[in-house]
Amino acid sequence: MSANGAKINLYDLTLDELTARLAEWGYPAFRARQVWEWLYRHYAADFGAMTNLPGALRDHLAAEATLSIGEVVLSQHSSDGQTNKVLFRLPDGQFIETVLMGYEKRRTLCISTQAGCAMGCVFCATGQMGFLRHLTTGEIVGQVIHFARELAAGGQYVTNIVMMGMGEPLHNYEHTLASLDRLTDPTGFNLGARKITISTVGLVPAIRRYADEERQTPLAVSLHAATDEERSRLLPVNRRWPLRELMDACRYYVEKTGRRMTFEWALIAGENDTAEQAHKLGELLRGMLGHVNLIPLNPTAGYGGKPSSPERVAQFQEVLTQYGVTSTVRVRRGIDIQAGCGQLRDRHLLNNPRTNTGHPAPH
Ligand code: SAH
Ligand code: SF4
């Protein structure tokens, strides 16, 4: 147990920490490796399933530890069956969302790194709820394990992960990076580092710090506007780190890692989908090793903006092409199940207002 008497989430531990803990209980290192495999290779749902462990160790684990990230409060499938969104309630009553998206051979999981978010981007449902808390490494990794377990039952597995759920991954730097280590560990979950994408709103010092780590895991920056005036209006963080500083950090990342930088751009009708913004963006990225993902806005309750029309999207993309800037239009997935980050929690709390207060939810 932890110092305050709560059970330890085994997904919060590194293999070394697990080994040390089991050693305290008198077990040799190979027992920790066995537990590790149950966690990251078999996604065991309970300690009883860990059949190659001595019964006394299983009992000890059950008494002192958990394998859980929380309770599944809602699980919704989109009408085309390709998207599954789950709302988890964490032990302290916070909610997080995770979305699984199927594309032909890919199974891409969109995971949360915080409950709420401190960055306040005006169009984002998570930003509208404010910052609640950081997730632990175990809570980040646990979302993946939940879906890996479900997919394994059908002979499938998680092929890609995007850190684009609730929260700003680089604001929760330590736990985000620790979860990368956990998910790419060859003795454990063993997902390729390139199969994970971290998306950031543009925390300049953290981008530089991440670049210095020279990791294989790609970074995406949520740009959404190519002038300071427009970007500060949509993303308050731009007032702290304006475009010039952000682009310097992005160029530093590209130089340091040799990797291209992906830029995200949620197209909002009449706001950031204008010819002027497209030309400014072209100028900003011309000659840079970068790529733009254009995503029509997903409307949220707290923001009046509308998604751009397909014609506008095409015009915007055409301008970028003139500057030699490549871009992809992303289809919005799971729109019928509120699959934009933060939206499922909002709807759940609307229907179950008391769950926000830590009272038991009426399910
Ligand atoms: N905090 C990180 C990652 C989570 S948000 C970040 O901001 O990058 C993941 C992506 O979804 C970001 O690009 C974000 O700008 C975008 N996003 C948030 N709300 C959206 C909405 N309503 N419509 C379209 N994209 C949205
Ligand atoms: Fe936070 Fe990202 Fe939403 Fe901005 S878009 S409020 S950084 S989760």
Image: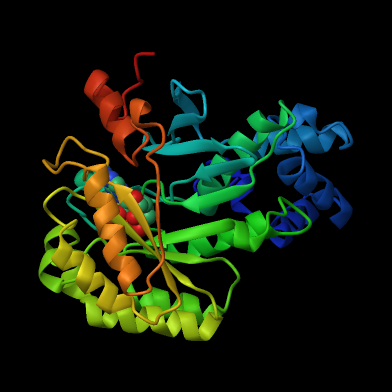
Residue 217 vs residue 363: left or right?
A: right
Residue 182 vs residue 101: left or right?
A: right
- Report x, y in % for residue 272: 17, 58
Task: Locate the C terminus and report the quarter of the image it occupies.
Answer: top left
Quadrant of residue 185 in the image?
bottom right
Q: Most extreme residue toward the top, as rendered?
A: 363
Task: Locate the N terminus and report the quarter of the image it occupies.
Answer: top right
- Report x, y in % for residue 83: 49, 31
Taking the image as drawn, is residue 363 in sight?
Answer: yes
- Report x, y in % for residue 256: 51, 85
Viewer-side residue, 21 vs 256: 256
Residue 243 vs residue 17: left or right?
A: left
Q: Residue at x 31, y 79 (%)?
A: 247
Q: Residue at x 27, y 51 (%)?
A: 313
- Report x, y in % for residue 199: 41, 59
Where 21 falls versus 107 (above or below)? below
Where 360 falls versus 113 (above or below)? above
Q: Residue at x 56, y 38 (%)?
A: 103
Viewer-side residue, 18 vs 282: 282
